[in-house]
Structures are given as C-alpha cells and as structure tokens.
Image: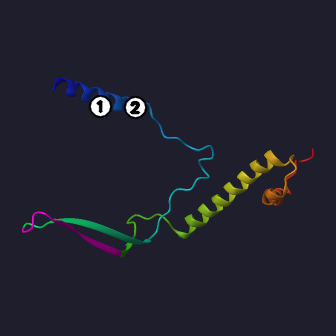
Amino acid sequence: MKNERIFLIVLMLLIIVCCLFSYKAQGRNDYLYSNSCERGRVELYTEIDRYDYDRRMDSDSDYFADSGKIGIRFSWPLQSTCNNEQIELMQENNRLMQELELLRTCGKYKDLQLGDQFAAVREMCKGVKKKVQ
C-alpha cells in the first residue's frame, strides 16, 4: 500500500514537471495561419451494436443480437464568429501562403533542369527570376 502511494506521488510530480516545462509551438508566419471558422455542419453516421443475451432457460447457448443505426447529425456552434468577411480573409491568407511557399520552392529548384515528371513545377516557376540590380 505504501509503495503504491509513493508511486502515485512520483507520477503526479512527473506530470506536473512535464506540464511546467512544456509550451505551445507556433509557426514562423503565425499571422498567416487561419483560425478555425465553423458554421453549421451535417454528418452522416452509422452505428452497429452487438448485444450479448443470456438465455436463462437454456444455459448451454448464448445468442447475439445485432442492431444498427443510420442517421444524419446537424450541429451549429452557439458562438460562431465566422462571417463572410472572415471567410474572405482566410481565403486570401491561404492564397498568400501558397504563393510564398511556391516562391520558396522555385528558389530551391530554379537552377536545376527539371524533367518531364516535374512539368507542373517547371510551369509554375517559369516566371520567377532574380531581380537585376
């Protein structure tokens, strides 16, 4: 009994120490990453349950009964801050993030001669050139 208490105390202290030294990881371009914007949501779902029934009359045999459900779930958050202006801003930020990623990719591969299997990269990066001073 005493060993169990010591183990629990040590475990609790370890969890507390881990929580104290952990921190939230953030991306480099934190302003570009969009927050979640949720309006209503519709979900289709299925459930299959298996029940084990014991027959009291005949103790040698048990039988299983299966039941299933199919349904539609609709949910709407009570405090949704998502409006059309925020959606447009999030889409603009996503486009900007894709363009910045494309520039970074083109900068890495612009001096390479890309084969046919990299036609998409070659096409997307054909207008990227260094600025002449």
Quadrant of the image occupied by residue 15: top left
Q: Is residue 27 left or right of residue 68?
A: right
**Number of marks in picture:** 2
Where does the N terminus fall, quadrant-wise? top left
**Is residue 67 found inside the magenta-colored segment of the image?**
yes
Q: Position of residue 54 (x, y in %)?
A: 14, 65
Q: Is residue 87 left or right of residue 49?
A: right
Magenta-drawn segment = 57-70
Tell me: residue 3, above or below residue 106. Answer: above
**Residue holding disc 2:** 18
Amino acid tagged 1: Met
Work out whether residue 75 or residue 30 is closer to the camera in this orientation and state it: 75
Work out whether residue 39 or residue 54 is closer to the camera in this orientation and state it: 54
Q: CA distance from mark 1 to mark 2?
A: 10 Å
**Is residue 49 found inside the magenta-colored segment of the image?**
no
- Residue at 44% across, 71% down: 40
- Residue at 67% across, 54% down: 97
Q: Is residue 121 left or right of residue 64?
A: right
Quadrant of the image occupied by residue 78: bottom left
